[in-house]
Image: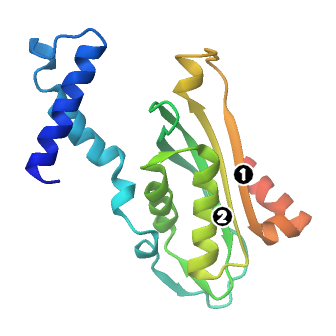
Amino acid sequence: MNEMRGHMIEDTIIEQLRYIGEDPNREGLEETPKRIVRSWEELFSGYKKDPAEVFKYFDSDGYDQIVLLRNIELYSTCEHHALPFFGEAHIAYLPHKKVIGISKLARLLEVYSRRFQIQERIGEQVTSAIMKYIDARGAACIIEAQHLCMMMRGIGKQNSVMVTSSLKGVFLEDPSTKEELMRLIMK
């Protein structure tokens, strides 16, 4: 980020601190605008990443069964309230002729979750990318997350967990394949 733009953003954060009733010059807050900008660079790094660059694939050598990465930690930011949501994602695909390195599934999730988001969209983006870039026979992304916008403001429901699924290809069309996936996730 260029230096002039960085200072403009820091000035905006200073004004936000004043808006909520804080003194941006008090000792504990003097460096806060700079820290927030640095934090945003990490939290929203997904905007600078191209999902196509995540994929490194290999010949499947005939492997045609479910590939599943379970319990992937997920951290994102609600686009409606600018508050975090967090949980776990389970990403699966059925290869056609290509398989990908397993870490690439977690990296793909990071590309999309490190943006202002809604949970539903993350799953759709992940499965669409898998279908597009490796021509999978099916793709699935199930996300279970807690949203601070539900927990610390508004309705204040502390134990609520939102579950979303995006299923494509055989996971959507074939009930037995979908059932096998759900059994694998629940183990």
**Neighbour tally class for label 1: few under 14, some 14-19, many 20 plus, Cα within 10 Å:** many
Along the line of sight, the residue nearer the viewer: 69 or 161: 161
Q: Identify whether 155 is placed above or below 141.
A: above
Along the line of sight, the residue nearer the viewer: 41 or 92: 41
Q: Extreme right residue here?
A: 175
Q: Residue at x 29, y 42 (%)?
A: 40
Q: Quadrant of residue 69?
A: bottom right
Left or right placement of residue 115 versus residue 67 in this view: left
**Neighbour tally class for label 2: few under 14, some 14-19, many 20 plus, Cα within 10 Å:** many
Percent x, y for residue 74?
Answer: 50, 45
Along the line of sight, the residue nearer the viewer: 97 or 160: 160
Work out whether residue 164 can be spotted: yes
Percent x, y for residue 87?
Answer: 56, 39
Q: Quadrant of residue 168?
A: bottom right
Q: Residue at x 64, y 89 (%)?
A: 97
Work out whether residue 187 can be spotted: no
Q: Say what amino acid the circle numbered 1 marks.
A: Ser
| Number of marks drawn | 2
Q: Which residue is mark 1?
A: 165
Q: Residue at x 73, y 78 (%)?
A: 137
Q: Which residue is mark 2?
A: 92
Q: Identify whether 13 is placed above or below 106.
A: above
Please name the colour scheme applied to the rendered image. rainbow
Q: Which mark is residue 44?
A: none
SS for tag 2? Answer: strand
Contact (Cβ within 8 Å) of mark 1 with mark 2: no
Left or right placement of residue 91 versus residue 4 in this view: right
Percent x, y for residue 127?
Answer: 64, 65
Left or right placement of residue 35 versus residue 76 in this view: left
In space, the residues marked 1 and 2 are separated at their CA atoms by 11 Å
Q: Say what amino acid the circle numbered 2 marks.
A: Ala
Left or right placement of residue 145 versus residue 137 in this view: left
